[in-house]
């Protein structure tokens, strides 16, 4: 057999075997790999290269070696699921590097992280002052997680006592100029609705690279021609303006009415409308 053909067949076998063993071990992102998994990945890759290119050796030995590595890794992963001590030994424990705004120098030495590296990791999380951090933890895979002190955390509707409805994931209704019926059905819309929205925006479906509908029923489109400016959806802004107009009309009625009972009723309606606007503002103004 010609060497080029043998190399091609070995490579094909190596790819298939490597794919199978990777499926057995499961998939993780590189940043999520533990030290042992990282070493295993490098070794398995080296063995696959050995199977592909070392034509003087029997490829079966490489397969056996690869199977042993994968088997040991799989067994260790199964044991780790049941034994925390082994998890701590192999993956090591997470370390708290900052607590209550105070850098824990002893823990930095344990994980061999310098102050420069710590500050760099903080900046990656958009934190420039260590005193603003409640907790900074280095996970077993080397990733940094940071919790800001309560007074430094971004303000949310929950802090204001406002309940908001959960958002639905946006659905693609147009992709590569083609209509996606599944996306429309997810929001209970049909093609007629989409055609009306496109007509309002003044674009044709074949000119749309991507179209998405959000949880408020607003259509956002990205055109093939980036020079064309598409108007932003105005449904939320229009609804907010309508609510404010209703509030202003009620206030006007309350001021102009000479009937005390009617004036009191209008005033009560103004207060209720003001509460409705306050509740809806986070949803309609973002």
Image (tube, grey):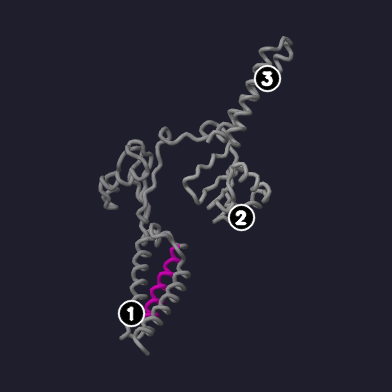
Kindly state the secondary structure of the residue where label 2 is placed: strand
Up-down: is 47 above or below 205?
Answer: below
Q: Where residue 53 sits in the image (x, y, percent)?
A: 33, 79
CB atoms at circles 2 and 1 under 8 Å apart? no
Frontmost residue, 201 versus 191: 201
* Residue 179 numbered tag: 2
Cα separation, mark 3 vs mark 2, equals: 48 Å
> Of callouts 2 and 1, which one flags the residue occurring earlier in the amino acid sequence?
1
* Residue 268 numbered tag: 3
Q: Quadrant of residue 259?
A: top right
Q: Residue at x 30, y 41 (%)?
A: 103
> Of callouts 3 and 2, which one flags the residue occurring earlier in the amino acid sequence?
2
Kindly state the secondary structure of the residue where label 3 is placed: helix
Q: Where residue 106 sits in the image (x, y, percent)?
A: 27, 47
Q: Residue at x 30, y 46 (%)?
A: 120
Residue position for label 1: 53
**Magenta-colored span:** 62-80
């Amino acid at each position: 057999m010609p060497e080029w053909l043998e190399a091609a067949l070995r490579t094909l076998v190596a790819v298939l075997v490597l794919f199978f063993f990777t499926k057995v071990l499961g998939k993780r992102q590189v940043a999520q790999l533990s030290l042992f998994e990282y070493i295993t990945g490098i070794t398995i890759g080296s063995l696959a290269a050995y199977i592909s290119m070392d034509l003087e050796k029997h490829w079966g030995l490489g397969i056996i070696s690869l199977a042993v590595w994968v088997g040991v890794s799989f067994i260790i992963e199964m044991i780790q699921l049941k034994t925390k001590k082994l998890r701590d030994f192999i993956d090591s424990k997470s370390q708290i590097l900052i607590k209550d705004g105070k850098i824990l120098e002893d823990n930095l030495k344990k994980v061999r992280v310098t102050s420069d590296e710590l500050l760099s990791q903080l900046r990656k999380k958009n934190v420039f002052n260590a005193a603003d951090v409640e907790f900074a933890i280095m996970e077993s895979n080397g990733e940094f997680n940071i919790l800001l002190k309560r007074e430094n955390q971004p303000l949310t509707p929950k802090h204001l006592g406002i309940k908001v409805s959960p958002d639905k994931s946006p659905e693609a209704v147009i992709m590569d100029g083609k209509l996606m019926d599944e996306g429309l059905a997810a929001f209970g819309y049909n093609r007629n609705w989409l055609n009306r929205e496109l007509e309002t925006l003044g674009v044709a479906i074949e000119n749309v690279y991507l179209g998405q509908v959000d949880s408020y029923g607003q259509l956002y489109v990205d055109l093939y021609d980036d020079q064309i400016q598409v108007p932003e959806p105005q449904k939320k802004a229009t609804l907010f303006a309508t609510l404010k107009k209703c509030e202003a009309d009620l206030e006007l009625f309350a001021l102009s009415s000479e009937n005390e009972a009617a004036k009191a009723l209008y005033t009560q309606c103004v207060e209720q409308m003001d509460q409705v606007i306050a509740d809806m503002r986070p949803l309609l103004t973002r």
